[in-house]
Amino acid sequence: MSSKKKPYKLVLLGDTAVGKSCIAVRFVRDEFSEFQEPTIGAAFLTSNINYNNINYRFEIWDTAGQERYRSLAPMYYRGSSAAIIVYDITQKDSFYGAKSWINEVKKRASHCKIILVGNKKDLEKNRDINLSEVEDLVSSNSIEHLLVSAKTGENINNIFEVICSLLPDEIEVKDDQINNIVIGQKSLKSNCC
């Protein structure tokens, strides 16, 4: 029999059009849309995962990547158990953006576990970021790194399993203390995933 854990707050951070929403939707609903609408402010989703016979509940904040929303990000990563920082392996600038997010989270939310995620693994032939540069960043910051494809679903669940393995043991809760809520705000169509 598996036990339940209290909900954990997660935040997805990264530049615009790197696929944060696509990763979240692929994990929560196992769906992918070629034309995902950009997030405005942030979207909220919840999902459960069973890891080592324990049911983890994740409250996922999918933040907007546009620069005009960046000042709102601290409100989402403060109090988060983990930050999933996403970059697009075909866009070098998004990797530099990820570096900036790593520095910001380490400085302002040092308790937060960081997982660096390279999205669009299905477009490996169009890779624009040297793997040794990624390995140097991961090693120097002692963080986890995964390559995923929101489009194909490859390694998406692994992100959340890695998070489970990094989370501290916390108080278990009863089923009636957990609520199901799914809220989202989207606008403007874009080919961002």
Image (cartoon, grey):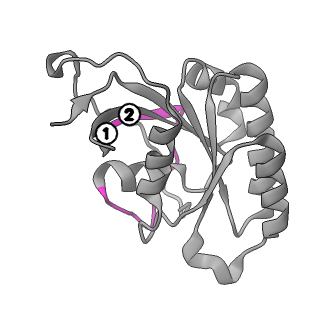
Residue 164 located within the stretch drawn in magenta: no
Q: Which residues are magenta?
A: 30-48
Q: How many marks?
A: 2
Q: Earlier in the sequence, mark 2 or mark 1?
A: 1
- Left or right of 96 on screen, residue 191: left
In the depicted structure, whether residue 18 falls above or below residue 181: below
Q: Which quadrant would residue 115 be assigned to in this image? A: top right
Observer-nearest residue: 102 or 25?
102
Q: Secondary structure at mark 1?
A: strand
Give the Cα distance between marks 2 and 1. 5 Å
Disc 2 residue type?
Answer: Phe
Q: Which residue is mark 1?
A: 47
Residue 129 appears in the rendering? no
From the image, give the main secondary structure of the stretch colored magenta: loop
Q: Which residue is mark 2?
A: 58
Disc 1 residue type?
Answer: Ser
Mark 1 surroundings within 10 Å by alpha-carbon count, few (fewer than 14), some (14 through 19), many (20 or more): some
Q: Are marks 2 and 1 in contact (CB under 8 Å)?
A: yes
- Left or right of 90 on screen, residue 150: left
Residue in view at x 29 percent, y 52 percent:
29
Observer-nearest residue: 124 or 170?
170
Q: Which quadrant would residue 93 be assigned to in this image? A: bottom right
Q: Which quadrant would residue 72 be assigned to in this image? A: top right
Observer-nearest residue: 75 or 168?
168
Return the x and y of residue 94 as percentages of the image width and height. 74, 55
Return the x and y of residue 48 as percentages of the image width and height. 29, 39
- Left or right of 130 on screen, residue 180: left
Residue in view at x 60 percent, y 77 percent:
123
Return the x and y of residue 184 as percentages of the image width and height. 37, 36
Residue in view at x 80 percent, y 45 percent:
99
Q: Secondary structure at mark 2?
A: strand
